[in-house]
Amino acid sequence: MGKHFKGKRLVWMVIAMLLQLVLIVVAVWRFNQYFVYFYGICTLFSVFILLAILNDKTNPAYKIMWIIPILLLPVFGTLFFLLFRSDGLTKHYKNSLMQTERLLRKEEGLLLEPPAKWKDDPLGWRIASYLRQNAKVSASDGTLSQYFPLGEDFFAALVEDLSNAKHFIFLEFFIIEEGKMWNTILEILKRKVREGVDVRLLYDDMGTIMTLPSKYDKTLQKAGIRCHAFNPMRPFLSIGYNHRDHRKIAVIDGYIGYTGGINLADEYINVYEKHGHWKDSGVRLEGDGVWNLTHLFLSTWLYFEKEDNCLFQYGPRRYGGPKLLAEGMVVGYGDTPLDDERVGESVYLHLINHAKNYIYITTPYLILDNEMVTALTLAAKSGVDVRLMLPHIPDKWYVHAVSRSHYMALLEAGVRIYEYTPGFVHAKNCVADDRYATVGSINLDYRSLYLHFESAVFFCGGPTPFEVKRDFLETLSVCEEITLEQQKKISRLRKLGWSVLRLFAPLM
């Protein structure tokens, strides 16, 4: 089924939403004979809304995004605030996810202290303790890791591990698209179902709206694959659609796990060229640390299907043998928009604020809040070698424009910025001081840091930080360094356009 046919679903949804907007405008217009009273009521009501916004814990950028239209257009601004600020993820959904996490933590004893020997590493211990307290995950020193600098390497290893699965396979991905990558995996999954393996799949409905047919989960269910679409899209206006499952997780028999930036579509393995050469990354875990990824998957899965059996059957020791001995500490973790804790951003800030020699970050998008800009510029001004790698060929022109709008302030502070000239960088990596690294699905943008469900792994010691650093430095050979002089030559008109786009940054 081609992309053109699949895209009809999105077209009809957009048409339905636009009709709803028109109806709202017409309804307000019909009140024009009572406009004075209606305007007065809306203006009074907008005062209470503005007070609520100012006292909310939301990021200041979000507050500004709502305050400006409410002040300029009290009637429409207030109505749109009430409409779009309604939460599409229902209270039942939130309670279910939180209850599942409490059940998992209680049954599996997830909240273990980090291994005592890591107290000698203050930053590693601090981040592991933070994740234990706020992401409800435990650190492991019994986990082997392998870093993949390209999607092709990730795919080859994943196929081999899926083919060797004996008991269960859990997959959770933002994007799936029919092609070489997904069709190869799908054939393995169908074969494993016939062999009696428990195969489960979660995919994001918005992420696949242009890549999969409608009700694709039902098609897979008929093939014996237990499958659900996360937060299904409906033709109704709601900001709840902003909350997407952006995670990339694969768990095999509870003992082997994968995460990173790679989705299950052909551009991620460079089978075809979408935005030039696609530069991505991922990691493979083996051992106790895989349980954190299993827990992330189950915390969402058990909303769709309740599990009465003991959850220990999915633990890493059930099928994987004794505890492994590894050099470094590994902490798989996730982030969720259902609480007020910005776990993904907090890990980045820990690393940036405490880096002594260098910090290198790879991200496809650079849509920063004030806290992140302050941390990056302060680190650079303090003598830390701060480098950022971004795409040269964008996937979304408007997001790329907002990313570039941050360059001037960062360059003036001494941050070095590089663009990957062969194509598009989709990797989400951070490495500092040869000892600390993160690899996962978390971009440096508002969506990843505030709105999406995300996954990542923090590494302290061991080989992975060196591998991430080596990949970054080797990739610099095909990057263009952006200079302050280049930015000063950009026209005022373009900068004005960037400024306008930045008003909508919290939605990008």
Image (cartoon, rainbow, N blue to C red):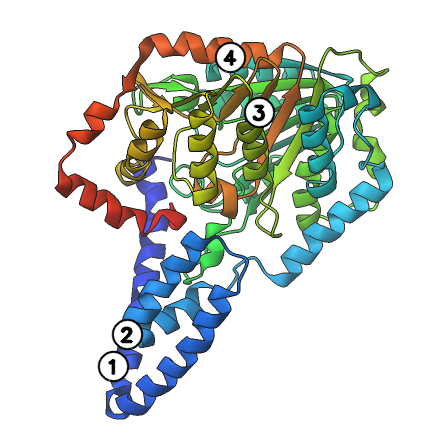
State the separation of the CA atoms marked 4 and 2. Answer: 54 Å
CA gap, disc 1 and disc 3: 52 Å
Label 4 or label 2, whichever comes before in sequence order? 2
- Kindly identify which residue carries mark 2: 25
Q: Quadrant location of the N terminus?
A: top left
What label sits on residue 367 in the rendered view? none
Mark pair 4, 3: CA separation: 11 Å
Q: Tell me if mark 1 has few (under 14), some (14-19) or many (20+) residues whose alpha carbon lies within 10 angstroms of its own.
A: few
Image coords of residue 213 (percent x, y) = 43, 41
* Residue type beneath disc 2: Val
Q: Amino acid at mark 4?
A: Lys
> What label does residue 29 carry, if any?
1
Residue drawn at (32%, 75%) of the image? 74
Furthest residue toward front: 382
Indicate the secondary structure of the residue bearing disc 1. Answer: helix
Circle 4 residues within 10 Å: few <14, some 14–19, many ≥20: many
